[in-house]
Each structure stands twice: as C-alpha cells, then as structure tokens.
Image: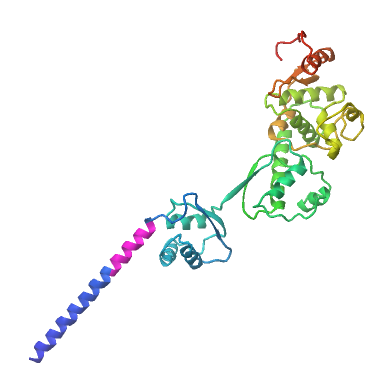
Amino acid sequence: MAEDTRSGKRRWLAAGLLLVLLALLVVTAVLYSRYQRFQQQPVDVPAEGLLYEFRSGASLSRLAHDLADRGVIDQPRMLILLGRQMNLAHRLQAGEYRLRNDMTPADLLKTLADGDIEQYSLTVIEGQTFREMLNAVRASDVIVGTLETNDADEIMSLLGFPGEHPEGRFLPDTYHFPRGTTDVEFLQRAHAAMQLQLTSAWEARDEGLPLDSPYEALILASIVEKETGRADERPRIAGVFIQRLRKGMRLQTDPTVIYGMGDTFDGNIRRRDLRTDTPYNTYTRDGLPPTPIALPGVAALQAVMHPDESGHLYFVATGDGQGSHYFSRTLKEHNMAVKKFQLGQSGITLPGTDQ
C-alpha cells in the first residue's frame, strides 16, 4: 500500500513537472514569436522620418527606453536583447540620425553602429565673395558659429593661414556635413578643397602661360568667373586676358573695378569709376590685381590653365539674354561690335562667322 502511494506521488510529480515544462515551452514560444515580430516590424515614425539625437555617452539601454518613451518602439527590453545579440551594444556612435518608417529595429541599431549620421548641405556659389560665403555659413542653423570677429586677417589666422588674403581661397561646391560642424571646420574644408584643385590644375597647365604662380592663376580665374556664367565662354574669356597679359595690355575688366569700389558700388559703373585709381582698377593699372576678386569654380580654374588660343583681345556682351559675348581680334572690330550690341546701331555687319 505504501509502495502504491509513493508510486502515485511520483506520477503526480512527473505530471506536474511535465505541465511546468509545457507551460515554459508555451511561454518561450510566445516570447520568441513576439521577439520575431518585434524584429520584423518597422519602427513607428512619421512618413518623413524622425530626427533622433543619440548623445555621447548614452547606452543601449538608454536608447531603448528613450525610443519607447517616444513611441518609436514598444518593447525596449527586446531592443536591448537584439543589440546584444548583434554585438552592437558598445558600438553605437553619437550623432543625429534620421529614423525612417521602413527601418526594422535591426536596421536602426545598424545605422547607429555604422555612424550613418544625418547630413546637411551648404552650397558655396561660384563668383561669391569671401564675405558673401561667410554670411551664408553664419546663416546656417546647423553650423556652430565660433568666429566672433569680422576681421578677415583674424579669421584667416584662426583658420590656420595667417597673412593669407581670404578672397578666392575657398572652393565653390556643395558641402555635406553633420549638425554641429563648426564654421572653422567648414571653412578649413573649403580652403583645403580649393588648394587641392588649384595645385592639380596648375601642375597640368598649358605651357607658355604668362602666369608666374598658382596664385596668379587663381586671381585670373576669379576674373573669368565674374565675367561670364557661360561654361562655353570661359576658355575664350580666359584666352582674351592671357593674350592681353602676353602683349602687356591692360586687362580693362569691369568686375575688378567694382571689387575695388567696395561698398560704394551702387549697381552702376560710370566713366569716373573707370578713371578712379584703386589697386583693383585694371583700367588704370597694368597686370593682375593684387588678389582674387571672388571665389572661382573648377571650370574657371581649368579655363585659365587651358585658355582658348584664337588670338582674341576684346569682347563685348551681346545682350541676347543668354549672357553671350562677341569676341574680336582688333580694336576696329571691337568698336563696331560695341556700336552694334551696346549702342544699338543697326546696319553694322561684323566679320567672322565663328562668333
């Protein structure tokens, strides 16, 4: 009888253990199913995405609970488990990220581990002056301003280029960068980009150019940049100035006069302005001005290094609404072009079918 009792107890114990194991299996299966669904379900963010800043020193646990508080995920512990399973718990990088509505939790974690930080952009436009570029940088709401001075010499010293005139030294381009980039970092990057392009272009320049240094090429490129916005005309404009330098002729280009006038320029250039001597007045002074007058782009640099060699010495705007110019080899032809295009005199036939 006692043996039967003990046998019954063992059966009940075995049955109980089996029920416990079954319950554990059911719970495990449910949890596993929920974990699988969690991994496959996209995070809950708007269609346009959500900018999220993962701060320096924050942990995976902090990330998970912060995202849960924002409603991006509903299971913070599962995100923690997933992060550890993917060996990403200590590889998450600080920064600002755009969370997309097609991201799974694994995608989100990988994005932070890869440091795929949200990028912003700022375009430095060809032909801008240094001051115009600096104002654009300061107007950005994602670039951190650290330069408290407006003095160009002080700014260049703070950038690491003491004694260097800033005009022309920064490459026009579209730059991409994360939030928190400083104005110094941005300007140093644009400066390095210009130096790289200028050095490369100078090393590959045509032989026989009347330019003694890369800086002289930079100065001339800035003039070409301001004289025309037409890509097809840049080498021809550069060719005119190259020919004039070879012959010892003054450049006689209005943009240098305007630059030399500074804030007194009111949008109109008059005869008296052309006669008023400044270091930048190429009507009153020989050769190149002392510095660039704007930020030249790569195309302007290339035009100066590889100018058109057609022998033109003059050009005048045609007023066709497309920024075109008429190019002349002689003063007589140029004067005829001025009468036709600038003074509106009809009945003038210009030579040359290549214009």
> In terms of image quadrants, where is residue 298?
top right
Give percent across and percent down for residue 267.
80, 33
Where is residue 24, by image quadrant? bottom left
Residue in front for this viewpoint, 293 or 21: 293
Q: How many marks?
A: 0
Farthest bottom residue? 2
Give x and y (percent) for residue 111. 50, 54
Specify the quadrant that holds the N terminus. Answer: bottom left
In the rendered image, residue 248 lying in the magenta stretch gets the answer no
User: Residue 73 or 340: which is nearer the viewer?
Assistant: 340
**Residue 247 horizontal/vertical position (percent):** 86, 21
Please indicate whether residue 34 sits to the left or right of residue 141 in the image: left
Colour mode of the rendering: rainbow
- Say whether residue 188 is visible: no
Whether the magenta-drawn stretch holds residue 32 is answered as yes
Prevailing SS of the magenta stretch: helix
What's drawn in magenta, residue-wise? 27-39
The spot of residue 211 in percent (x, y) is: 81, 30
Which residue is pictured at 69% across the width and 31% down the height? 299
With respect to residue 255, does 22 lie above or below?
Answer: below
Q: Residue at x 77, y 51 (%)?
A: 160
Instruction: Kindly identify the residue that appears in the image at 47 percent across and 56 percent down.
Output: 108
Q: Is residue 31 visible?
A: yes
Which residue does the image show at 79% across and 41% down from the upper left?
167
Task: Please identify the quadrant where the C terminus is shown.
Answer: top right
